[in-house]
Image (cartoon, grey):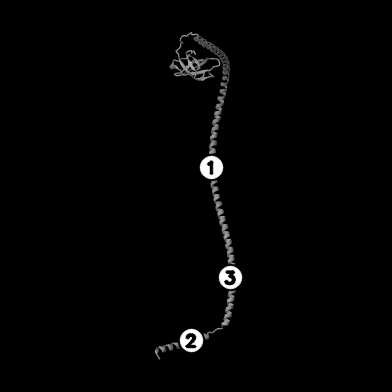
Amino acid sequence: MSALTKVFVLLVLLLSVAFAASQLILYQKREDYGTKYVETYEQLKGLRTEHNTLRAERDDLKRNLDSERAKNEALQKNLDEQKKTAGELAAKQEDKIQRLDADNKKLVQRCEERHQEIASLYATIKEMEANLASLEKTVNKKQADISGLQQVIAERESAIGDLQHQLRETKKDRQRLAEDNARYHGMVKNLVQRGIRLGPEPTPAINGIVVSVDPKLDFAVINKGAKDKVKANTQFEIYDDAADWVATLVINEVEDAVAGGMVISHAEGRSVKVGDKATTEIQIP
């Protein structure tokens, strides 16, 4: 027998001894597995019942927890809304307080201005009272003056009545003069037509044009003046474009380039107009 075989046989022998020993030990420790199974099953059943109970309790706790959580969320939301509302109300109150403070400052300023105005008005009233007293004295004096003026007016009205009478008489004289002047011009025209020549005019020949007329005052202005040898009381005859006699003008105001005077007579139904010819000569058509 070889050494390898011996070793192999020895190994098998050792394994057989170890196996027998283990079986012997197992036999000594044997148990009743049927009874153990029943006990284990009962324990498992109890554990399952306890597990179900615990699960139910867990579900109840979860439902309560969810309910409490929902309540807490609702409370938190309500609290947030209340905080937001409180913040808005606080901001509005702050803004309102600021506006009221600004209005109060303006009111105080206006009160101060009103006090100043009242003081100024009081001073003005005092000044006006003093002026009123002075005015009363002046009025009394003016009333005395008015009494004197009324007497003067009465005298002037009497003088105006006399002047109006004189004016009416003057108008009558001017009308008669106009009629005489018209007859004179008619006679001159008739004499010229019959070939009778008149002598030269005693005044230098000055020819101009009417540049302004005031019908209410019978006042006319011509474009000839002192530089053209026009003098006060110079008499001008006024003719229209057809060389028909219109009126007689007597100068009483003389300037360098213009002169003005009163229309002392005019042809019946005729009046002096701007553009009429003014001359110191008698024109024959």
The amino acid type, in three-letter code, at marker 3 is: Arg
Say which residue appears at 57% left-offset and 60% top-offset.
Answer: 73
Q: Where is residue 190 in the image (x, y as percent from the top left)?
A: 51, 10
Eye-nearest disc, 3 or 2: 2
Say which residue appears at 53% left-offset and 42% top-offset.
Answer: 106
Question: Which residue, given by chain and number where applicable, does mark 2 sit on?
Answer: 19
Near mark 1 (Cα within 10 A), the count class, few <14, some 14-19 or many ≥20, is few
CA–CA distance in space, label 3 to label 2: 48 Å
Q: Judge whether residue 23 can be spotted in this image.
A: yes
Eye-nearest disc, 3 or 1: 3
- Between 250 and 23, the one lying in front of the other is 250
- Between 27 and 149, the one lying in front of the other is 27
Looking at this rendering, what residue extends furthest in the left direction?
Answer: 3
Mark 3 element type: helix
Which of marks 1 and 3 precedes in the sequence? Answer: 3
Say if 229 sits above or below 58 in the image: above
The amino acid type, in three-letter code, at marker 2 is: Phe
CA–CA distance in space, label 3 to label 1: 74 Å
CA–CA distance in space, label 1 to label 2: 115 Å
The amino acid type, in three-letter code, at marker 1 is: Lys
Question: Which residue, given by chain and number where applicable, does mark 3 sit on?
Answer: 55
- The N terminus - image quarter: bottom left
Q: Identify the disc placed on residue 106.
A: 1
